[in-house]
Image (tube, rainbow, N blue to C red):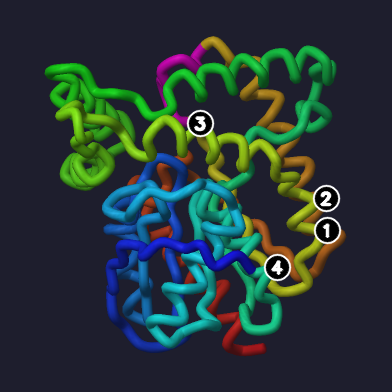
């Protein structure tokens, strides 16, 4: 294990019982867990962290071994090395990797809608070459947006977008605002940027693309909860022209998750009537899914 870790920002939600470590998605922060964590803390000891380069945590080279070392250092510091990693999106991918690398002490993993963009052959009804071409376009959009510098007045525009999302998804605006404010930082030159900064954001995107997630899922021999969002996020800027690809992706994901759960008794798939923004949109169903899974671990 590489030990080049950084000291992560941590929110200790307290609680007693089996410890949980909450991991957020790419470009997000621990603020995303604000509505879910108190529900979990009624039954568990709960920590949430800002991953390196996110929120209030320091920057650092964004390589998965170093990120996992950060997580290990937090759990060692708090004396809970056997915590259950519970992640959303990128955090879910990291939860699985962490559990695989620490199988001797980690009871399992929870991955909430952390499935990436898949592989070309996973897109039902599309030729792999066409799917790869469209995926390349999405990756280009993501790379262009990485480490976005906020222009003068741009913070106001970002918050206006959050207010619109609040109305569309029924998410309390204050939760969305808190997430933006935790993720926008002032650079040395006085400009505002969305974290992680461009250099590390590009490293992070490359690391995500390198993961063969279903291969990781099949390697798990400990209990694994995979939560899938059943509804698309409405009006995603830049992605609304990829409707055909998104539909094919959803069909392929449903097929592959069903096959995985049917063939691997340690895998549980939870379908959640929510969008990818499930942590803020539907905190109670998310918490119930995690609590039910964790209760099964305690019973084993």
Residue placed at 45% from the left, 70% from the top?
A: 21
Residue bearing mark 2: 259
* Secondary structure state at the residue bearing disc 1: helix
Residue 181: x percent and y percent? 19, 41
| Sequence order check, earlier mark of 3 and 4 | 4
The alpha-carbon separation of the residues under discs 1 and 4 comes to 21 Å
In this image, 165 relative to 68: left or right? left
Quadrant of the image containing the N terminus: bottom right
Query: Start and end of the magenta stretch?
Result: 233-240
Which numbered disc, 4 or 2, marks the residue that appears first in the sequence?
A: 4
Q: CA distance from mark 2 to mark 1?
A: 5 Å
Instruction: Give the mark nearest the N terminus, 1 or 4.
Output: 4
Q: Position of residue 245 (x, y in %)?
A: 66, 19
Q: Residue at x 41, y 55 (%)?
A: 51
The reply to whether the magenta stretch includes residue 165 is no
User: How far is mark 4 from mark 2, CA to CA?
Assistant: 21 Å
Disc number for residue 262 = 1
Q: Is residue 40 visible?
A: yes
Q: Pointer 3: what residue? A: 232
Asked if labels 1 and 2 touch by Cβ distance under 8 angstroms, the answer is yes
Q: Which mark is residue 168?
A: none
Dot 4: element: helix
**Gap between marks 1 and 3 measured at Cα:** 25 Å
Alpha-carbon span between mark 3 and mark 2: 22 Å
């Amino acid at each position: 294990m590489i030990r080049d870790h950084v000291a992560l920002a941590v929110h200790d939600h307290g609680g007693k019982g089996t410890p949980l470590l909450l991991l957020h998605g790419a470009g997000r922060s621990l603020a995303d867990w604000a509505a879910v964590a108190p529900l979990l803390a009624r039954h568990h000891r709960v920590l949430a962290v800002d991953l390196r380069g996110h929120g209030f945590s320091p920057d650092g080279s964004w390589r998965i071994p170093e990120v996992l070392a950060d997580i290990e250092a937090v759990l060692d510091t708090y004396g809970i090395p056997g915590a259950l990693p519970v992640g959303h999106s990128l955090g879910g991918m990291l939860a699985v990797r962490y559990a695989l690398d620490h199988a001797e002490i980690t009871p399992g993993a929870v991955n909430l809608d952390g499935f990436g963009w898949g592989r070309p052959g996973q897109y039902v009804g599309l030729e792999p070459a066409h799917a790869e071409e469209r995926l390349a376009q999405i990756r280009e959009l993501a790379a262009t947006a990485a480490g976005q510098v906020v222009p003068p007045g741009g913070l106001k525009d970002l918050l206006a977008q959050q207010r619109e999302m609040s109305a569309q998804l029924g998410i309390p605006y204050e939760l969305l605002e808190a997430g933006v404010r935790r993720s926008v930082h002032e650079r040395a030159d006085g400009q505002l940027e969305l974290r992680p900064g461009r250099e590390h954001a590009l490293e992070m995107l490359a690391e995500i693309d390198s993961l063969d997630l279903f291969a990781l899922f099949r390697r798990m021999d400990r209990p694994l909860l995979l939560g899938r969002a059943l509804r698309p996020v409405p009006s995603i800027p830049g992605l609304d022209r990829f409707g055909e690809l998104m539909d094919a992706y959803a069909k392929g994901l449903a097929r592959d998750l069903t096959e995985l759960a049917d063939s691997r008794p340690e895998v549980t798939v939870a379908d959640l009537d929510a969008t990818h923004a499930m942590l803020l949109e539907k905190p109670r169903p998310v918490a119930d899914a995690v609590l039910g899974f964790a209760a099964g671990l305690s019973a084993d």
